[in-house]
Structure formats: C-alpha cells, structure tokens
C-alpha cells in the first residue's frame, strides 16, 4: 500500500477550494451580466429569440432587476411624462436638423420648431414594441415625428399664410394634436401637448407682403375714419345752419305779427339816458306821449 505524504494534503485542498470559488465567481458574474435593472419610471419588454416561446413577452416587466436567460434580452420604455422637441438647432440628442416643414394652401413653404409632451401606457409597451420593433427613442425620432409633421402639414394646407401669421397658428397646432392622438392614443402613446417653439419661419417675401398688406389696410382704415369724421363735422354744421335758419324765420314771423316786440326789446336794453339825436333823426325809442 502506497504511503500518502500528509505534507501535500492541505495545499491540494486549498487549491480545490480556490478552483471551486473561482468557478462560482465566474458563474455568478455571468448570471449578473445576463440580467438587467429596469430603472424606476420605466418598464421592460422581454424579447425571446430561442425556443418555442420566441417573440415578445406580452407582460411588461416592472422596475427592478431581471435575469436574462440564453436568447433573451430586455428593452426599456419610459412610462413617465416626458417632454421632447423637434428643432433646427442641435440639442441633447445630436446636431441633426429636426425642424418641422409644412406649407399653406398656396404651397408656400415654412418651417418651425415643435415641442410635445407625452407618456406611454405601461401595459401597452410590449404591444408597441411588437408592432414597430423599435426602441422608445427610435419610435420618437421616426414614426411619431413623421406623424406630427404630417398632422401639422395636413392642417396648414387648409389655411393661408396670413391666417397663420395673424393668430391662427394656435388653432392649427391643436387640430394637429387631435390628429396625432387619434392614431397613437389607441396604441398606448398619449401626446398631451403639442406646441410651437418660438415663431413660424416664414419666407421673407411673404413677411414683406403681409406687412405691406397690413400697412395698406391700416392706412385705408385711417382714411375711412377721417372721412367719417369730416362727414360728421359737415352734418353738424348743416344741422346748425338749419337750426339758425329756423330760429330766424320764427323770429321774423314773430316780429311781423307783433311790431311792439322790437320796441320792447329796445326798452329792455335802454340804459336810462335819453337818446342824443341831431337834425331830423328820429330816436329808436318812440318817446311820444299819447
């Protein structure tokens, strides 16, 4: 029977323990790396690519840590209300020009920056991914942006640029919002606000034309006001002249029928002094005594 050297027993046991520990650590690290943490305010959509259950899991994953088995991955969808912008200028998503282009009923081109506020129904996140096979950001930058642009264009094509310039743009954007929600709300995407950012960028030739027309309208209104004032003043003078003529007619008629009225008026104005007359002049007041 061979002798076992006791001096080698502990080193072999230590090596075995170390090896097992390493395997467990690697396995544990592998399990951790195969999982994903869904952040608060988000839901997860699990996609399976292997096995008989391949496809999108219809049940959304709540926030927290979730394991991924072989052939599984998780896509996150934000479900809290968020604000996004489509602008010409660079933003946090990159330097791309994302302004919205549209035209009026005369095909005059315009552009504008637009802001929307939206949220996703958590229960419909899996169905949304199943339909588009896109992440949330890809949906926002792709089909949703296209529908916002189409909705705005469909409304502006029914009105004139003057209507937009003179305040109608708010009516247009609210109608566009209704169009967007008619398509996206049933899918679980609710757009609660859709607003212009700043002013619409009109072609300069249109701005010049609108301003010239506005000035012409203002000048015409001022001229009409002046005509109305002049007519009112003329009418007032005519009425005054008619009043004076009627007054004189009545006075003459009164004097003709009552000559004593003239004598009475003279007496009323007499200061008490006898009139100074010369030659054959006759005093205005008759001083003869009867």
Image: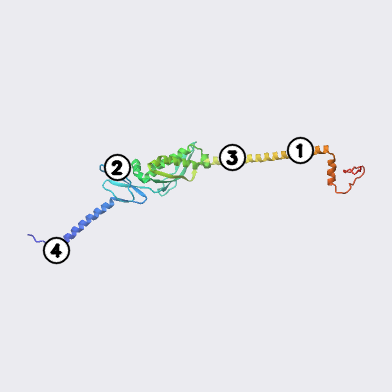
Classed neighbour count for the residue bearing mark 4: other residues with Cα under 10 Å, few (<14), some (14–19), many (≥20) = few
- Which residue is denoted by mark 1 in the rendering? 246
Element under disc 2: strand
In terms of sequence position, does the residue under pointer 2 or pointer 4 come before the other? 4
Hey, which quadrant is residue 22 in on the image? bottom left
Image position, residue 14 (x, y; %): 18, 60
- Which residue is denoted by mark 2 in the rendering? 55
User: What's the CA distance linking mark 4 and mark 3?
Assistant: 110 Å
Image quarter hosting the C terminus: top right
Q: Nearer the viewer, mark 2 or mark 4?
A: 2
- Which residue is denoted by mark 3 in the rendering? 217
User: What's the CA distance linking mark 2 and mark 3?
Assistant: 65 Å
In terms of sequence position, does the residue under pointer 4 or pointer 3 come before the other? 4
Q: Is residue 8 above or below residue 252?
A: below
Residue occupying the point 29% across, 42% down:
55
Q: Nearer the viewer, mark 1 or mark 3?
A: 1
In terms of sequence position, does the residue under pointer 1 or pointer 2 come before the other? 2
User: What's the CA distance linking mark 1 and mark 3?
Assistant: 43 Å
In terms of sequence position, does the residue under pointer 1 or pointer 3 come before the other? 3
Element under disc 1: helix
Direction left: furthest residue: 1
In terms of sequence position, does the residue under pointer 1 or pointer 4 come before the other? 4
- Which residue is denoted by mark 4 in the rendering? 7
Image position, residue 6 (x, y; %): 13, 63
Q: Mark 1–mark 4 contact, CB under 8 Å?
A: no
The reply to whether residue 205 is in sight is: no
Image position, residue 148 (x, y; %): 43, 41
User: What's the CA distance linking mark 2 and mark 4?
Assistant: 58 Å
Image position, residue 234 (x, y; %): 70, 39
Image quarter hosting the N terminus: bottom left
Classed neighbour count for the residue bearing mark 3: other residues with Cα under 10 Å, few (<14), some (14–19), many (≥20) = few
């Amino acid at each position: 029977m061979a002798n076992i050297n006791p001096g080698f027993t502990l080193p072999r046991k230590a090596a075995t323990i170390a090896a097992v520990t390493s395997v467990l650590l690697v396995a544990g690290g592998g399990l951790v790396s195969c999982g994903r943490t869904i952040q608060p305010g988000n839901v997860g959509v699990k996609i399976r690519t292997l096995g008989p259950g391949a496809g999108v899991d219809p049940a959304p994953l709540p926030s927290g840590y979730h394991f991924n088995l072989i052939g599984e991955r998780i896509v996150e969808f934000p479900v809290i209300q968020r604000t996004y912008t489509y602008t010409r200028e660079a933003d946090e998503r990159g330097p791309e020009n994302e302004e919205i282009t549209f035209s009026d009923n005369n095909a005059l081109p315009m552009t504008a920056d637009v802001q929307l506020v939206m949220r996703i129904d958590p229960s419909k996140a899996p169905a949304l991914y199943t339909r588009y096979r896109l992440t949330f950001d890809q949906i926002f930058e792709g089909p949703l942006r296209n529908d916002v642009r189409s909705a705005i264009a469909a409304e502006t094509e029914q009105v004139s640029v003057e209507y937009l310039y003179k305040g109608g743009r708010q009516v247009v954007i609210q109608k566009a919002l209704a169009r967007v929600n008619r398509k996206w709300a049933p899918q679980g995407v609710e757009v609660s606000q859709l607003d212009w950012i700043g002013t619409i960028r009109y072609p300069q030739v249109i701005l010049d034309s609108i301003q010239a027309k506005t000035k012409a309208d203002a000048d015409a209104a001022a001229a009409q006001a002046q005509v109305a004032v002049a007519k009112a003043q003329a009418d007032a003078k005519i009425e005054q002249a008619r009043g004076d003529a009627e007054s004189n007619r009545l006075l003459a008629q009164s004097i003709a029928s009552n000559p004593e009225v003239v004598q009475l008026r003279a007496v009323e104005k007499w200061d008490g002094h006898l009139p100074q007359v010369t030659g054959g002049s006759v005093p205005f007041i008759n001083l003869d005594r009867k």
